[in-house]
Structures are given as structure tokens and as C-alpha cells.
Image (spheres, coloured by chain):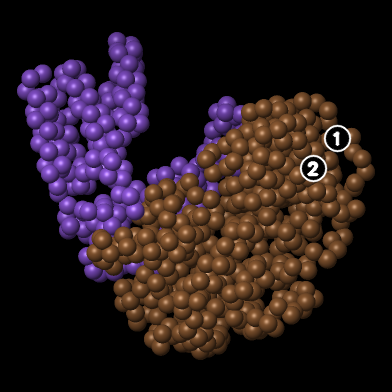
Chain colours: A brown, B purple
Amino acid sequence: MIELIAAGFTYESDVEGRSETEGVTDLHLSIEEGECVVLCGRSGCGKSTILRMINGLAPQFYPGKLTGTVHVSGKPIASFLPEEKTRLTGSVFQDPRSQFFMSLVGDELAFSGENLGIESTEIRTLVQAAAARMKIPHLLDRPLDSLSSGQKQKAAIAAATILSPKLLILDEPSANLDEKATSDLVQILLQLKQSGTTLIISEHRLHAFLDVVDRYVLIEKGTIARIWTKDDFAALRYEDVKPYGLRHPDMTRVNIHENTNNDASRYVWEGKSLSYAYRKTCKPMKGLDITLRTGSVTALTGENGVGKTTLGKVLCGLMRQQRGEVYYGGKKRSAAGRRSLSYLVMQDADYQIYADSVGNEIVLGRRLNDELRLRAYEAMDTFDLRALRDRHPASLSGGEKQRVTMAAAYCSDAELIVLDEPTSGLDGDGVLKVAAWAKKLARAGKTVVIITHDRILTELACDHVVEMRNEQERVRTIGP
Amino acid sequence: MNLRIKKVRLDPRTHLLILLLMSILALIAASHAQSIAIMLLGMLYLVVLGLFKKAFQYGLLFVCFKAAVIALGGTALGTFVIIFYTFSTMIPLMMIASALMASSPSVMMCAFERMRLPKNLIITICILIRFFPVIVQEMVSIRNGMRARGIFQHWYSVLRQPALAYECFLMPLVVRCLKLSSELAASAVLRGIECTVTRSSAYPVGFRTVDGLAILMFFILATGIYVVM
């Protein structure tokens, strides 16, 4: 199905700088029809570039130089007509928001068919069939904005597979999904594989896909370093994959040498009988109690749409609770009062970076004095940012941007720091780093809350786990 | 797919023709009464299409502008009167255009292609329309990001440092828009937007009796407004 012989690609340097997506060289890989292959490796190792070479976006869309041979179905991908290519391949991107062209699910599914000029009644039959395969017929009339992450991912796969392509390419499909949605995704992929579709997936959460994958291909520094069969990969221990920066379920045994100070602290954040309802996608929360100690790391977990982020925003004062109170240090705090005491690090760092240099970013919005300057240097040292001090934040890689927002949180006066899904789309090393940073923040005396469905991060970094369920809440404490 | 047949659906070309008629009418209308009648005609158009919320919003906007013109009339702020007056005459056109933009991009692209508009232009128009709500969402996210960092905590904080606020807003917006637009275009390419065959639509596209009726009714009412009033 796919044949890569001494294939390589170098990006033409462009305005975006592309610090994240380096080129790839000397790839030799042959993928059979009906096979499922996962590309793994560190962030920025070139996985996405390989996917782009196979679907023809590189160099057709991303300018650069292609070397060697890239054959799909026995022909170079560049020699296909747009019609042929659309029928042969389907692609699903990491961020579903940016790949939807229409506003309604049904319209979105029909898009490929319309481009090919397929007759209207036939398109509707195809749309119904694709929706039935993904079990989303009830969503066809819904606006795409109103869907949950899992539903969006299903809609994206349905839209990519409407013409039953022989090849489906998925770029980090599980990045925004919780465990249940991920296992749903694996079932869908299994079904596609059984119908003969060749699947190429770039992923960080590797073990979740064991049921469907045939081979794992490790990419390091832009070339293929190892290939494991599914059974070989399943037998690997964490020590075996650690040097490659991969995720492993046993990662949780790692000891992060940052003890949080668990001495009974005077200051405690308390939410008492909080109630809030927010949007249609979230279920309302009623009578929720939560206690957070300073200097500790607490994980807020639970399925997508259960209201984790909303609780985080209520605690930070970004949203008002409808009922109940939030106390800090024994005093009742208004939403505005909480806002001045807290810092929420959003999942997407792009929304929280504003200044013209890393140094200015960390102290942004506050009057610079000697004390603050000292603290900013301390923050830069803690998060390893000294060397990047004068760089423009927009030119940094995703991981570096995340570090900048963490350092800004460290440097700020905020007592409560909420991290929203900090490890989505990160490799094994990235997860370890985030866990260490969270502990650093806690050690600096902050109260840290991590909203996450990443079990590895929860086990690594958190002293307490608050698992949220519909209309009730359960607190489970782990660790010493 | 339920094709939302509950509402009256007009061909995008009908909207365009009516937009043209509306422009002419707005241009030649002179009296105060006429401008109100034109506004009502625009509202009627939206209501018939089932766009009640839009009809109400534009109606309110019109009243505000008119009120501003009356309130400022005779004061030294003559320039503002002209601005508000111009806006108020533009509202009926904006209403028809919003009816066009409310139709499915799928139908729009197909109809425009039948009008033999160049393909590049059609894609540009549709991406632009797709991008409006995205930009609004992105701006909301950036605003939330600032609040979450504790920058510009109060609504009046922006007024204290407007230059800084502008800069803080623009940088992430540009970065996000560059990223989103390139990914959106890549996705469209992969899904066959460059195919040379004439595109189709999952919806029926073409002039129907409703379109003829709509144009006829609009023409009669518009002539009525011009001649009678």
C-alpha cells in the first residue's frame, strides 16, 4: 500500500520558524494493505512530517524538498489527480476545530462528496451510512460547535471516511479524549481495519491502541530508529522505552524528587456546597464540597463534559457559582477576590502569551521592581528559560510556550494555580516534566489543581485525586 | 439528514438579486417614513425565512441609531449624526446579506459555481464566512486567557492601558489565525476542494417557485414603498 524508500523531506524555512517540525531523512518503510501502523517518538521528531509526505501535503501544501521515493498504491502521491487522491485517502487532524469546513455535522460529512460532484441523493445515502458506522446519526443536525471532544473526533473520522478510502491517516487522535472516548475510538478503528482500511496513526498514548495496531514505528531525530511488532511492544518494560521518551503505563513508578510540603498549612481553599450549571454540553453540578490545601497538588478527574474545567473556573473566580461559597484562609472570597488570588493555565498556551519577549511575558501586567525582577529570574531558572529570555514567545515550540506560562504562574502572586489538561499531546518526557513542574509550584507554596484525564500524570504528580461524577463527587486520596 | 425544510429556503442567487434590489431602494429612498418602511421590509424578509432573532437584533440596532440621530440632531456633533444616519440606512442591506450568510455553505458554493464565478473566489468567500465565527471565538478565548492570568482583571482595566491591551490582544489573535487558516486550508485540500469536476450539494440547489414568489413579492412591496410613500 505504502512504500517509502530513502525518503526524506526538508521544510523551506518560512515565517513560522518551524522550530517544532523538523524535516525527516532516509526513511525506509513498507506498509501492507489493511495494516495498522503507529508512529511514535518525541514531540517534534518528525511524525507529522511523515504523515504529510504520505498524504501529499508535503510538499504540495507545505513547501519544501522531497527526496527519495514515496509510493502510495504503487504510484507517487504527486501523480494522483485531486479526485483520485480524495477517494484514496482520508485524514484526521489533531485539533478537530481547525478541520471542519461547515457548521453542521451533516454538511461536514457531505463535503468530500460534494467536492467530487456526487449526486445529491447518493451523497445523502453516503452520509447516513458513515454516520451509522460511527454511531452518530442523532448528531447530523447538530452544530459542530456544540459537540464534545469525543463526538467531534467521531464526526471528523466519519467525514474523512465517507468515501470509504483505502487509507486513513490520523494525527494524534486521542490527544483531547478521555479514557472512555479513547477506547471508543479504538473500537471504531478496529472496525475500519476489519473492513480493509489501512491505518496510519501518529500517537503518544501507545498502549491504549494495542488492540488495533500491528506495528509500532519509532521515529527519532527525523528517521526510523526501531520497528516493533505489537507483541514485542507489549512486552517492553518502562526501562526499555524510557530512553526514547515514550509513554508507558508503568511510568507511575518513577520517583519525582520533589517532595511537596504536606505540613498542615494554615491556608486552605474550601468550596462549600457549590452549584453551577453551564452550557448544554455540561451536566449541572449540585452541592459540591471541595478542600484544597496549600502546597499540595490535587487532580480533578472525570469524563469529558462532567464539569471539571467549569469547577476550575469557579474556583479561580472566572465564573460565578450559582449557589455555595468559596473560602480561602477562613475568609469568604468573592469571584473578583478569587481572580486576584489565582492563575489558570489554559490547555492552549497560544491564548495566554502576549508580550514581545519571554522575560517581559513573565512579569507582564505588573510594576517592575527589584523584588519582582529577582523573582522573575528565579522563575526563569526554575523552568529553564534563561537562554530563551530575549526570544519572542511566538517563535517558541509548544513545549517551550507551556514552560513560559508555568513560569509566569510561578512568578505571579497567585495562591491557587489551576492547570487545564497540561499533558494532552505530550510525549513521555513531557509528562514527567509537567509532573515535576507541578511539584515545584506546590513547593513554592502554591495550591495546585490539575484538570486532567491522564492517569499517568495523576499518579505521578498529585497528592489528592478528586474524581468528579455526574451530580455527585467522590474524593479519593492517594500517596502518603 | 433532515434538511431543515421547516423554514422557507431560498436559493443564494435569490438573496443576491434581492440584495441588489434592496440597495437600489435604499439609495433612492428619501423620506423618513420610507426608510422606516424599508427597515420593516427587511425585517419581514428575515421573519419569513425564520430568522426571528436576527430580525429582532437588527430592528433594535435600527431604533438605537435612529434615536442617536434624533438625540444628536441640533447639537455640535453633526459628524456623528451623519455617521449614525449612514449606518441606519445600511442596516436593511446588512439584513439581506445576513440571510445569505445563514444559508448552508454547501448550497452557496454550489450556486455560485453555477453562476460561473471563479473557483478561487468561491473558496475565498466561503472561508471568509467560515472564519467570522472562528475569529469571535478566538477573541473570547484570548479574553478568557487574560482574565485567567489576572491581566486586565476588571472591565475598566483595559481603558487604563489601551495600547497594552491592543498589543496583548493582537499578538495571540494573529498567531492563532495563521495556524487555523493554514490547517483549515490543508484539510480542505485533502478533502478534494481542488477537484476540477463541477461540485454538487447534498441539498437541492436551484430556482423554485418560492424563489420566484419571493422576488415578485419583494419587488411589489419595494415599488409600493417608493411610489406610494
Would residue A315 be visible to someone looking at this image?
yes
Q: Quadrant of residue A217?
A: bottom right
Picture residue at 34% right of the left edge, 53% below the top: B1
Residue A464, x across and y down, in percent: 81, 48
Contact flag, marks 1 and 2 (Cβ < 8 Å): yes
**Circle number at residue A447:** 2
Query: Which of the chains bears the disc numbered 1?
Result: A
Figure check: A398 above or below A201 = above
**Circle number at residue A443:** none
Q: Nearer the viewer, residue A217 or A302?
A: A302
Q: Crowding at label 1, few (<14), some or many (≥20) Cα neighbours within 10 Å?
A: some
Q: Secondary structure at mark 2?
A: strand
Give the mark, 1 or 2, whose residue is nearer the N terminus. 1
Residue located farthest toward the top when viewing the structure as drawn: B74
Q: Quadrant of residue A429?
A: bottom right
Q: Nearer the viewer, residue B131 or A146?
A: A146
Picture residue at 87% right of the left edge, 50% below the top: A260
Residue A333, x across and y down, in percent: 74, 27
Picture residue at 50% right of the left edge, 52% below the top: B176
What amino acid type is highlighted by mark number 1?
Answer: Tyr
Q: Horizontal placement of B14 versus A57: left or right?
A: left
